[in-house]
Image (tube, rainbow, N blue to C red):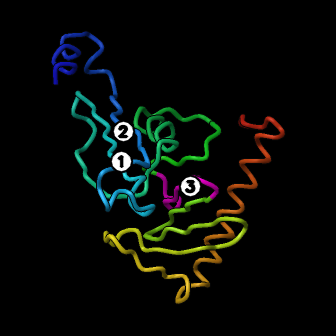
Amino acid sequence: RKFFEQAAKEPWFKKTLFVIVADHTPSSNSEVYNQRTEMYRIPIAFYDPSGKLPRRREKVIFQQIDIMPTVLDLVNIKTDYYSFGNSYFSKEPREAVTYLEGAYYYFHDNKLLVYSNDKITSLFNFTIRTQNPVNLLPAQKWEAEKMAKRLKAIIQRYNHDLIHNQTVVR
């Protein structure tokens, strides 16, 4: 509050888009937030003091790499850029990838795929908040395989671009 009270006195304040985002940590005292389906949930807010940005509150897949494309959209900058993230306003499917302790966690729609040692280990509906999430893999193997194919493509593209130093728009 004090920051915004002081910043409001500055001439640049009403021309600034503020991005307020938390970092995440795998350690928590909460049994719920220690689960892989929950531990990456963090708040993010975009604040436009001019009031041009409509107020919305939504629960969607959004990760830190989506910030830059979203900010470019919000400030109406049309340019080519390199990013694995997508703007919040993009029509692309919402997805996120995290990697922890030898496993990839791929979020798509309402599902979380866990992929480790070149195999699918589990599939969860991460929108159902419970201490004991049900592994949907036996019943939805076809969906898990489709998600794993997309995840492998993301990993392959990421590794290729890093190896060949191609992290620029061409």
Q: Residue at x 64, y 73 (%)?
A: 120
- State the residue position of label 1: 42
The quadrant of the image that shows the N terminus is top left
Quarter of the image that includes the C terminus: top right
Residue 148 at what x, y percent from top left?
Answer: 65, 70
- Give the alpha-carbon distance from disc 2 to disc 3, as whole Å: 17 Å
The amino acid type found where label 3 is placed reads Val
Is 110 placed above or below 169 here? below
Q: Nearer the viewer, residue 74 or 83?
A: 83
The image quadrant of residue 16 is top left
Q: Is mark 2 on a helix, strand or loop?
A: loop
Label 1, label 2: how far apart the Cα atoms are: 6 Å
Per the model, the C-alpha gap separating discs 1 and 3 is: 14 Å
Structural crowding at the residue carrying mark 3, measured as other residues with C-alpha within 10 Å and reported as few (<14), some (14–19) or many (≥20): some
- On the image, the x and y values in percent for residue 70 come to 45, 41
Is 98 inside the magenta-drawn segment?
yes
Q: In this view, does 37 lie to the left or right of 18?
A: right
Q: Is mark 3 on a helix, strand or loop?
A: strand
Kindly identify which numbered label has been placed on residue 22.
2
Q: Which amino acid does label 1 sit on?
A: Ile
Give the image location of residue 88, x and y in percent: 43, 49
Q: Is residue 157 above or below residue 15?
A: below
Give the residue type that dot 2 points to: Ala
Q: Give the range drawn in magenta.
A: 90-102
Q: Specify which label sits upstream in the sequence, 1 or 2.
A: 2
Q: Quadrant for residue 60, please give it.
A: bottom left
Q: Does the magenta stretch include residue 157?
A: no
User: Marks 2 and 3: CB-CB under 8 Å?
Assistant: no
Task: Left or right? Give the position of 13 relative to 119.
Answer: left
CB of mark 1 within 8 Å of CB of mark 2? yes
The residue lying at 59 percent from left, 34 percent from top is 79
Q: Earlier in the sequence, mark 2 or mark 3?
A: 2
